[in-house]
Image (cartoon, coloured by chain):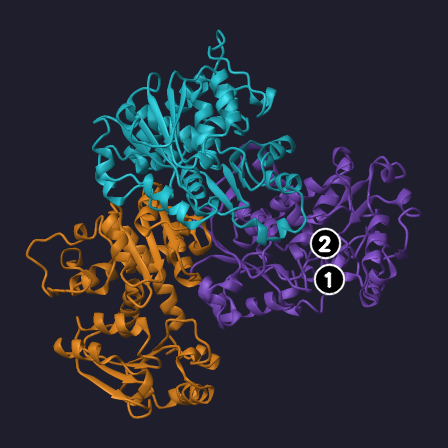
Chain colours: A orange, B purple, C cyan
Amino acid sequence: MNAMASGPGGRTVSRHLPFGEKRDSRFYGQSILSVSQFDQVDLATIFEVAREMRAMVERVGSFDLLKGKVLTNLFYEPSTRTSSSFVAAIERLGGSVIQINNVRFSSVAKGESLPDTIRTLESYSDAIVLRHPEKGSAALAASHATKPIINAGDGPGEHPTQALLDIFTIREEMGRIDGLTITMLGDLKYGRTVHSLSRLLTLYDVRLNYVSPKILSMPSSLVESLAKEGTPQNEYRELEPVLPETDVLYVTRVQKERFENQAEYEQVRGTYVITPETLAAAKEKMIVMHPLPRVGEISMEVDTDPRAAYFRQMENGMYVRMALLALVLGKA
Amino acid sequence: MNAMASGPGGRTVSRHLPFGEKRDSRFYGQSILSVSQFDQVDLATIFEVAREMRAMVERVGSFDLLKGKVLTNLFYEPSTRTSSSFVAAIERLGGSVIQINNVRFSSVAKGESLPDTIRTLESYSDAIVLRHPEKGSAALAASHATKPIINAGDGPGEHPTQALLDIFTIREEMGRIDGLTITMLGDLKYGRTVHSLSRLLTLYDVRLNYVSPKILSMPSSLVESLAKEGTPQNEYRELEPVLPETDVLYVTRVQKERFENQAEYEQVRGTYVITPETLAAAKEKMIVMHPLPRVGEISMEVDTDPRAAYFRQMENGMYVRMALLALVLGKA
Amino acid sequence: MNAMASGPGGRTVSRHLPFGEKRDSRFYGQSILSVSQFDQVDLATIFEVAREMRAMVERVGSFDLLKGKVLTNLFYEPSTRTSSSFVAAIERLGGSVIQINNVRFSSVAKGESLPDTIRTLESYSDAIVLRHPEKGSAALAASHATKPIINAGDGPGEHPTQALLDIFTIREEMGRIDGLTITMLGDLKYGRTVHSLSRLLTLYDVRLNYVSPKILSMPSSLVESLAKEGTPQNEYRELEPVLPETDVLYVTRVQKERFENQAEYEQVRGTYVITPETLAAAKEKMIVMHPLPRVGEISMEVDTDPRAAYFRQMENGMYVRMALLALVLGKA
């Protein structure tokens, strides 16, 4: 991990493990702020621990690795899914939670600065998960904290644990990441998820296809940045031409608010709905992913298709978060 | 339990225990959706386990029967009482909770279907308690879930754990259920509680009295349904004539919103208030029950009367829910 | 402890330990309602246990002293700080929590009386922490409860655990309390914190300075009451003359709502801001305290000054609350 040194902006990826370095100790006490802080070896470590967590949950449900540890789950914005996933993660490791929802209505929010809130809460707990509407808030929190901060989404910024669980899912479902063709579909302009994911995928040898309406296409700055890393990328308006070659179809939500008129929204939305008919043209061995919640982008009839990986993806979120907590708190 | 097979609507009650059947295994992994899924033997099993739970709590407070189990408490409507009771139940059994309140304000609610929410949350937890404003929502959730769903109220539908704790209270307070005269008072038209309770009481040999203003009387469809089961029922406008014969007086809240004008409400409300004077005409050995919260239907002066069973009824709720969790999660 | 007998109003302080009395047993099962219920020996007991708690947390993080105990955290008003502190306290002692936030929006609040809510919740839990907007609510709750009630703020009334952690902080930071000069700054009229603290300080031999604008000065009734106890008090409009002699500077928030016009507020607010420059005139060995949250009364540049004790003060809140829970639940 090198983000602590170089910051979320200026990443310097080292793809090779320094000789003799004990990897796990690199996580202990560290904050998880950005995908740019990880190299491929970090990911391999996280995934290995996540696999152990899955095996443990399947066998005994929970164990006392983090017994006595207290995690603060500090959510300035509601996020039932991410929040619940972290609660389950710490509880299945024997720890407990201080849950703080809807901070905007609470006294903490009444004019108190984020650093003050963080310094107070870290005096009660062993680590803090932070969801906050402002970009850079997690890094700001970490710069004032002596305990690990885990970024659970900082507005238009990053959501690194989502990107990690996405890549973990690809790895577990497809058996590998290198050599895959990954097609991202939907709102690629505002989708924080696909931005973090595509950045993290530059660590691997993949091909990326972007399918979106023109007004929701991948930001050119991001495309250029990925090009510099040597990742092949292609842009499309239709899914049809790229579906047959796709190994991973990553579907995102198209939000009505992004469109100037309702008709345009309905048209775009209808174009990109994944149905059993859509998947008839897809490989037999491929997967469909979605960060959820979905609001119609994938029909419920797809759920029983073995290629529908989105609920397994959710479950993987718990294992990856268990792994991060165990690593950061020094018990993995 | 037979509701899984026949559904909440079409119940087929078997009053006799099949030879050699191991009862507890009938609960393992099952959802608790409706009172109609239970027969008398099921109730005896639940009550026996609930008694063990009470003894355990009185002796040591908590024990680790469900250590490592994670319960999701998913409340689309606020319900401090029911929610807290389930939290206490799982915690006193050594398990932990994912608490989700006021879902309507959270991202899960933003257009996500109930089945998707359930499928996500069951990937984190071992069982889900669901309170939802729509009738049939618990059954819908269970039909998409692989983990047990416990219905904690589905709008105008059912609230089976309330009915179970009510009958358990009658049994523990009066020493028996068969042969009792049970008088229900107040809003019998909209009161979900008395509907579920009266349905479940058809498993026993009881007499039911209904006391309410005409506009809030027991729905005739329900009265007919109970008549077919052979339960004697009588309707009254005043409590006075039936109080002396009453073994269990079940008082419910009369809500102002049900009345067209304020004067009518005040009159009805005043008529049915239980005071120490009211109870002067009651048996020495009888009990007063109320699902709570009360807003004046029972005066606080009654609280010290040994016949006032409503706070013991609350406490029984915890024991019955502990029993259900233990049975459903296979540890009782 | 004598408040149980004499009530929050009429305190009778005994400064000497009755011969042969076993102190800890005086806490078991008792409510914590008002600072007036404690004498100096009670405080010494609480502080000794709090020190043990701190040592334990520093060494192992958590331990199972209250394993199996369930604490209800009942907050009618939001208070992330106090609420989180109690959650951390019970969890680090191995117990668990029923968390009830924003009761005003929940069904419990719908017309249910506080005594009914308390009687319900005590049937699920071993103790109840109560934050409520009305003065006297904690005492009302305690008078209906059979389990200990811990007052976490009853509107304009008291917030005894805050006063306890404040005095504990003074003791730990300065090594003693007797003989100190304590200067309170800011809004002394409405500040519940400084009222409870100054009352509790009459148990010790201290000098109190009050620095505030005239319209926010210490209530004369309180000043008279403290004078009867023999505590020397002096009132000022400026901090400058008393800062050099001050051992403890207790800063409070000045709320905009207290002023008739914005200009007056800005002027007062600006006058009392503590900066590194302010502290140049202060003793080398003194401390700056603040109940937090701050909104500008102390500049962030002061945070790195070793005399800035407010974050350590926060942390002490957890240890004092752990001590109270352990004492009240009979395990310290």
Q: Nearer the viewer, residue A249 or B4?
A: A249
Q: Amino acid at mark 2?
A: Gln
Q: Amino acid at mark 1?
A: Val
Q: Is residue C141 left or right of residue A136?
A: right
Residue depicted at 67% across the width and 56% down the height: B19
The subunit carrying tag 1 is: B
Residue depicted at 68% across the width and 64% down the height: B157
Q: Is residue B243 left or right of residue A15?
A: right
The subunit carrying tag 2 is: B
Which residue position is annotated with label 2? B40
Q: Secondary structure at mark 1?
A: loop
Q: Is residue C53 left or right of residue B246?
A: left
Residue with the most extreme top position:
C19
How far apart marks 1 and 2 lie (CA) works out to 8 Å
Residue depicted at 70% across the width and 57% down the height: B39
Q: Nearer the viewer, residue A91 or A2?
A: A2
**Quarter location, residue B137:** bottom right
Is residue B267 placed above or below C301 in the rendered structure?
Answer: below
What percent of the width, then of the height, locates residue C246? 30, 25
**Quarter location, residue B34:** bottom right
What percent of the width, then of the height, locates residue A245? 26, 87
Which residue position is annotated with label 1? B13
What percent of the width, then of the height, locates residue C40? 44, 17
